[in-house]
Image: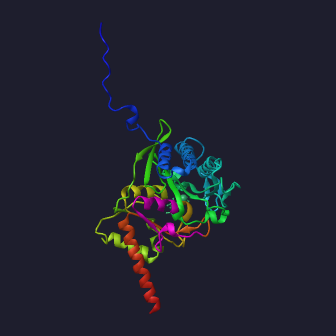
Amino acid sequence: MATIPHPPSTGPALQTRRPLIVTAEQHILQQQQKHFPEAGGTFSELLASIALATKMIQAKVRSAGLLDILGSAGERNVQGEVQQKLDVYANQALLECLGQRDTVAVLVSEENEEPVTFGRAPETGKYVIFFDPLDGSSNIDVNVSVGTIFSVFRRPPGSEVNSAVLQPGSKQVAAGYVVYGSSTMLVYTTGQGVFGFTLDPGIGAYVLSHENLRMPDHGSTYSVNEAQSDSFPDVYQNFLTGLRTGALRREYSSRYVGSLVADFHRTLLKGGVFLYPPTKGYPSGKLRLLYEANPLAFIAEQAGGSATDGERRIVEIQPHEIHQRTPLVFGSSAEVEEFQRCYKHDSKTARTSTSA
Ligand code: AHM
Ligand code: MG
């Protein structure tokens, strides 16, 4: 009679093996246990709620061509921009998923004129969250990548809503984004490095795919809406001319998606520099400090890059209103340092010529 052989040994015991996958939710919990053991789990629940909302959004984005959800919802948001139907859905998904958490004190969205408050006592409502629910939404109808951006702060003990929402970006406790691109990716930081997860549609989970992301020290791409360059301040024009003529002894190509999340994601992975300068149409810059520039600046710095408005690090800006705009330059350290050098040089020249 034939005997059935024992299966060959498959290596170390199950519990000592590297896990097959690490999901974003597991990772957030592990990071919390490692770096903030006293936190008690509420913070990781909150990030899990954001992850859930973005899965709902990505499902709608993926079926945008199938369902009757393309195009405008016919209303304008606080910036005077026409809201897309997906903007409205994305905002609702985040408000609902986060609003159910007792730990959330205030939500601030690009799509809501005022902060959304829940009247929760400071002991329970500990967190203030900013988000741009669907960044780059003018690109939806042409099937170009869009994204969600978020930023998390602690509510200072006993603070009123106004002071809770007007904190500089250096106080962020977490930030991240999801890019709905050729795959859906979640990237986040809690100040302990930057981690990227790719959504596995088969199991509906964000799976760790990019551990400890680092932005290259320099790149070969600059990213700016060059059609508007005639109205850029001189320093931006001089900087770009410098890149083109070899100030950093490199050759550059230009890449500009027009979806901030997608342009940031490329810059994070490949290096280079992104600029949204003040323009004639947007004299203070177009991008919003609290739910666009701050979270991306936090991630850029955590990955070894930089983000500035020229005068100072983005995260040092003291906000004065929730929808405030800022000039934004971020990217690899080499390119951003060169921009800072041009900026200081131009300000010095301007000061010298006015005092002459
Ligand atoms: P929004 O879609 O949330 O309004 O964001 C503004 C978008 C950014 O994603 C992008 O970087 C920028 O506007 C592009 O602006 P422009 O078309 O002026 O180059
Ligand atoms: Mg946006």
In front of the other: 333 or 342 = 333
- Can residue 155 be seen at all in this image of the molecule? yes
Q: Is residue 166 above or below residue 128?
A: below
Q: Is residue 202 above or below residue 73?
A: above
Q: Is 36 left, or right, of 76 in this rendering?
A: left
What scheme was used to colour the molecule?
rainbow
Which residue is found at the position 54% from the left and 48% from the top?
44
Q: Which quadrant is home to the C terminus? A: bottom left
Residue extent of the magenta highlight: 292-319
- Can residue 180 be seen at all in this image of the molecule? no
Q: Is 118 left, or right, of 333 in this rendering?
A: right
Q: Which quadrant is home to the N terminus? A: top left
Confirm whether the magenta stretch covers residue 293: yes
Q: Residue furthest right?
A: 119
Picture coordinates of residue 62, whole percent (x, y): 52, 43
Q: Is 84 left, or right, of 339 in this rendering?
A: right
Picture coordinates of residue 42, whole percent (x, y): 58, 48
Which residue is found at the position 51% from the left and 64% from the top?
170
Q: Please tell me in which quadrant of the rendered image residue 339 appears.
A: bottom left
Q: Residue furthest left?
A: 249
Q: Residue furthest front?
A: 38
Q: Is residue 65 above or below residue 283?
A: above
Q: Residue furthest bottom?
A: 356
Q: Quadrant of ligand 2?
A: bottom right
Picture coordinates of residue 24, whole percent (x, y): 48, 45
Confirm whether the magenta stretch covers residue 129: no
Q: Please tell me in which quadrant of the rendered image residue 266 appears.
A: bottom left
In front of the other: 10 or 38 = 38
